[in-house]
């Protein structure tokens, strides 16, 4: 194949040497012009990393006709395209997603006849977060930390507990304020309705991504397509499996398979079984905000002293990861210290599958670092309440655990004071960063 | 919508309880044995809290434990249903334990037990008997994930409301070598093979059922030898016939060593 390409290139080269420069230049200009004028409309991409993962788990490959295409069709029918978003008919979805706002953020960048900005997502977000919201836009690989992948619906910095969706306000805040110490800037200069539009669009991409993930992992991914695939598309195991079946069993399995696929041709079933429960969680997020007892009146010095004691105690275990001097150097483990977005495709105990994921666009795994608390930089915000939420609820997707119920709100307020005021401020105290593990060199 | 779900669940529960003792009950027993050589478990790399965690004998990787006569520990066996199949009838003997609290402890930086089985109606007490802090980061698919710290000597209660297709994984962020599994199944017909590879599931409703075999080393057992016959299934699903008042002894279930990952 490679050789063929080289040969044809040579042919092109020798053609050019024959002196027909003008014709080639014209052709090149023509090609560029055509591509420029008729560049294809932006499209959502299928979550091939999730598909690949499911394929490895089930040792089967997805059937294009019966799995990949139906998934793409269901998603398009339910959510539309990047240029023309629609919403699935879930009762009450308008309380979560505002289609008018989503349309303001969707589509190509420009302005309408009233001078109102359109295509805000592509103007401000897409280069890092990607058209599909996969956190793998063109600049993503150069950023540390990587941009958020919205598709699993997991967010770190929020007012709700792990496993709960963030509130609208949580996402709005991080767009407005940015995430300190990361490449995520503040968008305070945008109008508030533009920030609103982007907030809705991020939620839209999340809900779409969660729906897709559910279809891949739990629904279509549960099916073994060997029985419906033509022999030429089966891998060795699938072929062996099909051969082990009697004619009757084969027909039976085929019928079962098609019945499952047909189940999701019904929009009602999609709404009821897949999208409905996802939207419902977003709907309830507002009721799930962690309630916090008011900060007790106390001499700051005293509060810091109490916080310090807690920080080093076996009751909270803070120093275990953040280190004896709070430089974030307490966790030296070489094994599993990756976030959930990375752990989705990378198992540090079995790096053999990584190559396949990287080829599909997964980002090179990078280790997490417990925060160095002496720099005064807090990604999720540095207000007391932000730090309170981080300690009480932990950080979803990262390794930071939630404080146990026996640690009282009052005690957490002391920890907040200690973290904010009880540590030496030392911008140069940056510890030696963990280098990204070069798995291929190591093995 | 929630109400509707609840009422239909109630209806289903009523149907199920009325179906109780429809066809009688039987017991399933068996013994998982590894055929071939398996390397002894490797000691884990203890990177911190060595005073508590670095013990003699050292902590080992528990994912593949084989007894002296080849018995395979920690094979999970559960009754497997199609996605829209109704739940099987539940024998009265399981009612007494329906609201039990199942314990998972942190003991010298390992989860005890390594594999635990729980029903949605039961609670789990996540304990920490060590003098240092641990945390439980539990991730599944149907249940909300959580990651909660347990102070030295502390504990907290948790309930998993939904059944999980495969066992949930528990891990500790402070001590990354720690791993445990939580099997959440609605129907109580679940067993985990003991050190010698044996398991028993009592009072299974009579009939032909699919059971899934899953092992901590690499998931579904896709090829086993049962009753002298080699059987294959990608999802480790095997049909087992249960007869009223009888014990179905599956005898020795052989798993080839090279089919076990790691």
Image (cartoon, coloured by chain):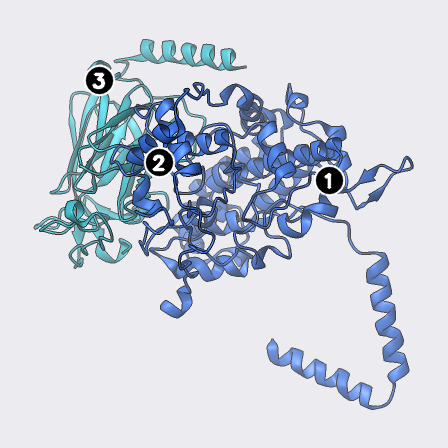
Chain colours: A blue, B cyan
Foreground disc of the pair 2, 3: 2
The mark that comes first in sequence, 2 or 3, is: 3
Q: Quadrant of residue A116?
A: top right
Q: Chain of mark 3?
A: B
x, y percentage for residue A8?
Answer: 71, 81
Name the quadrant containing residue A98. Answer: top right
Left or right, residue A90 beside residue A415: right
Mark 1 neighbour class, 10 Å CA radius: few under 14, some 14 to 19, many 20 or more? few
Indicate left or right for A145 with A442 as reference: right
Viewer-proximal residue among B123 and A105: A105
Mark whose residue sits in front, 1 or 2: 1
Q: Where is residue A25 drawn, in percent x and y? A: 86, 77
Examine the rendered structure and indicate whether residue B17 appears above or below residue A303. above
Tag 1, which chain? Answer: A
- The label shown at residue A189 is 1
Q: How much space separates mark 2 and mark 3, taking CA atoms?
A: 23 Å
């Amino acid at each position: 194949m490679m050789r063929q390409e080289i040969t044809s290139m040579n042919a092109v080269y020798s053609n050019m040497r024959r002196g027909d420069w003008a014709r080639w230049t014209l052709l090149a200009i023509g090609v560029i012009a055509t591509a420029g004028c008729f560049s294809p409309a932006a499209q959502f991409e299928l979550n091939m990393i999730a598909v690949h993962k499911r394929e490895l788990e089930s040792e089967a490959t997805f059937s294009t006709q019966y799995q990949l295409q139906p998934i793409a069709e269901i998603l398009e029918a339910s959510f539309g395209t990047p240029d023309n978003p629609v919403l699935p008919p879930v009762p009450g979805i308008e309380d979560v997603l505002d289609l008018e706002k989503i349309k303001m953020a969707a589509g190509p960048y420009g302005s309408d006849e009233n001078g109102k900005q359109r295509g805000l997502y592509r103007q401000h977000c897409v280069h890092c977060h990607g058209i599909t919201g996969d956190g793998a836009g063109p600049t993503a690989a150069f950023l540390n930390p990587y941009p958020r992948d919205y598709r699993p619906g997991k967010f770190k910095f929020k007012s709700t507990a792990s496993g709960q969706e963030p509130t609208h306000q949580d996402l709005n805040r991080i767009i407005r304020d940015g995430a300190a110490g990361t490449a995520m800037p503040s968008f305070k200069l945008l109008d508030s309705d533009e920030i609103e539009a982007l907030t809705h669009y991020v939620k839209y991409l999340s809900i779409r991504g969660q729906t897709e993930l559910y279809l891949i992992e739990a629904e279509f991914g549960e099916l073994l397509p060997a029985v419906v695939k033509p022999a030429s598309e089966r891998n060795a195991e699938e072929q062996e499996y099909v051969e082990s079946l009697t004619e009757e069993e084969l027909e039976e399995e085929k019928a079962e398979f098609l019945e499952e696929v047909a189940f999701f041709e019904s929009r009602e079933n999609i709404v009821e079984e897949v999208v409905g429960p996802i939207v419902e969680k977003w709907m309830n997020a507002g009721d799930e905000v962690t309630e916090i007892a008011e900060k007790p009146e106390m001499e700051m010095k005293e509060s810091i002293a109490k916080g310090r004691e807690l920080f080093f105690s076996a009751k909270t275990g803070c120093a275990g990861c953040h280190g004896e001097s709070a430089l974030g150097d307490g966790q030296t483990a070489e094994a599993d210290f990756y976030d959930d977005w990375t752990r989705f495709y990378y198992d540090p105990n079995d790096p053999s599958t990584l190559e396949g994921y990287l080829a599909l666009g997964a980002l090179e795994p990078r280790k997490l670092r417990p925060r160095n608390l002496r720099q005064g930089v807090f990604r999720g915000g540095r207000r007391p309440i932000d730090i309170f939420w981080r300690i009480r609820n932990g950080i979803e997707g990262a390794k930071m655990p939630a404080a146990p119920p026996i640690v009282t709100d009052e005690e957490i307020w002391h920890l907040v004071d200690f973290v904010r005021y009880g540590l030496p401020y030392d911008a140069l105290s940056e510890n030696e960063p963990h280098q990204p593990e070069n798995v291929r060199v190591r093995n | 919508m929630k109400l509707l779900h609840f009422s239909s669940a109630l209806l289903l529960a009523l149907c199920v309880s009325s179906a109780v003792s429809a066809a009688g009950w039987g017991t399933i027993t068996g013994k998982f044995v590894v055929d071939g050589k398996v390397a002894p478990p490797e000691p884990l790399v203890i990177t911190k809290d060595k005073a508590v965690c670095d013990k003699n004998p050292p902590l080992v990787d528990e994912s593949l434990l084989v007894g002296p006569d080849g018995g395979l520990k920690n094979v999970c066996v559960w009754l497997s249903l199609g996605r829209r199949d109704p739940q099987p009838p539940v024998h009265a003997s399981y009612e007494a334990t329906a609201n039990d609290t199942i314990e998972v402890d942190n003991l010298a930086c390992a989860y005890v037990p390594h594999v635990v089985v729980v029903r949605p109606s039961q609670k789990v007490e996540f304990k920490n008997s060590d003098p240092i802090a641990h945390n439980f980061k539990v991730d599944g698919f149907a249940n909300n994930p959580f990651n909660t710290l347990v102070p030295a000597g502390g504990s907290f209660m948790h309930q998993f409301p939904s059944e999980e297709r495969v066992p949930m994984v528990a891990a500790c962020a402070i001590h990354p070598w720690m791993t445990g599994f939580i099997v959440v199944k609605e129907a109580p017909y679940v067993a985990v093979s003991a050190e010698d590879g044996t398991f028993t599931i009592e009072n299974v409703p009579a009939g032909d059922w699919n059971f899934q075999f899953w092992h901590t080393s690499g998931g579904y057992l896709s090829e086993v030898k049962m009753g002298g016959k080699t059987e294959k299934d990608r999802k480790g699903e095997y049909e087992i016939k249960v007869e009223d008042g009888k014990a179905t002894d599956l005898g020795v279930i052989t798993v080839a060593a090279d089919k076990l990952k790691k």
